[in-house]
Image (cartoon, rainbow, N blue to C red):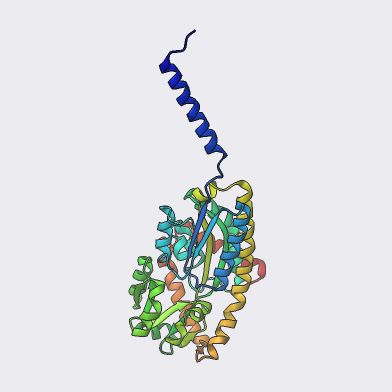
Amino acid sequence: MTTLPSQRRWQKLASSALLALAALGSLPAAAQSLRIGTLVPKNSLYHRQLLEIGESWRAAQGGNGKYLVYPDGSQGGEAEMARRMRIGQLQGALLSVVGLREIEPSIAALQIMPLLFRNWEEVDYVREKMRPAMEKKFLDKGFIVLTWGDAGWVRFFSKEAALRPDDYKKMKFFAWGSEPDQQGIMKSLGYTPVPLETTDILPAIQTGMINVVPATPYFALATQIYTSAPHMLEINWAPIVGALVVTRKAWDEMSPATQDALRSASEKAGIQLRAKARQEVEEAVDAMKKRGLVVHRPNAEQMKEWTALAEQLYPRIRGTMVPAETFDEVMAHLKTYRAGKGK
């Protein structure tokens, strides 16, 4: 059968298209990018661990991956970083509960219940009991939890000495800008919260906009907060709990081998972070004391006042800042743990 000129032209076009597709298939895959945001200071323990995770991820990628860490809150506050992950501007973040609760509100139970946990053993026990279900909740929201960490206990750094809860009612507190419920509770109890981002803390306390910063000793040392707020109340108000998360979209774009390498490196980093961060709390306090920090320890009577304040807060937190069922679950785990320890 004779082939018409028009048919020959279509055959040539089809052949050219097939060759072009074959050439595209032989090209290397486009390099994946992982952009990780965090509030942690540059060159801090946390920043260095994130960089080590990146080396493992790049090696598994075959050297063509781009891994960038943005420390010092350069991508905004934690609520902003959660938003940036949702729209693809970031693929991951190392966040405290403040940012994590923007993804899954129930995580707040691990951090914002004051004077609930007596020690790190209790924190670890409750977190591990809740971990599988919590990670499933994050997965359902489109995020993969790679590892869990913490950053020490929150203590109060102030311009003037203070020992009792009432002493702080004449002062102005730093408060997370993304936590209106917490601010409302503080106001109802007679305290004055000033909503800010963490990058604004130092200039705010230098200018008198705020007088008190609830912060971990490590953070106070790294950011030099203690130079303007040289009085620290030695009370373990609440643990700072956090996690490294990546978007499920970024995760699904990785090969199984790369996923395994990333998870393994992250778990290893999480163990290092938890161990070293807890050790560095006292080291940070000692370092600040040598440079003028004054540490105040509440006596038994003053601690009763703090405990009474915490117990007054729990009914306000349950069902607002922490879902009621999660609040009750934490309490049940603690009861079980303490019963086993004879406490």
Q: Is residue 222 left or right of residue 279?
A: left
Q: Nearer the viewer, residue 253 or 314?
A: 253
Which residue: 59% across, 73% down? Answer: 277
Residue drawn at (38%, 71%) of the image: 197
Residue 334 makes an appearance in the image: no
Q: From this viewpoint, which residue is outermost toward the right?
A: 341
The count of marks equals 0
The residue at 47%/21% (across/down) is 11
Residue under the image location 33 percent in, 74 percent down: 187
Locate residue 45, reporting x and y percent: 57, 72
Who is closer to the viewer here, 42 or 19?
A: 19
Determine whether, in the image, residue 89 is placed left or right of residue 184: right
Estimate the x, y position of residue 261 in percent, counting from the top left.
Answer: 63, 54
Q: Is residue 315 visible?
A: yes
In the figure, 39 relative to 171: above or below? above
Q: Quadrant of residue 49?
A: bottom right
Q: Quadrant of residue 43?
A: bottom right
Q: Relative to residue 215, is residue 9 depicted above or below? A: above
For the C terminus, the image quarter is bottom right
Q: Nearer the viewer, residue 259 or 336?
A: 259
Compared with residue 9, is residue 303 higher up or lower down, i.e. above or below? Answer: below
Residue 144 point in image, percent of width and height: 53, 53
Quarter where residue 149 is shown: bottom right
Q: x and y percent of residue 211 in the render?
A: 38, 83
Task: Left or right? Give the position of 56 relative to 95.
Answer: right
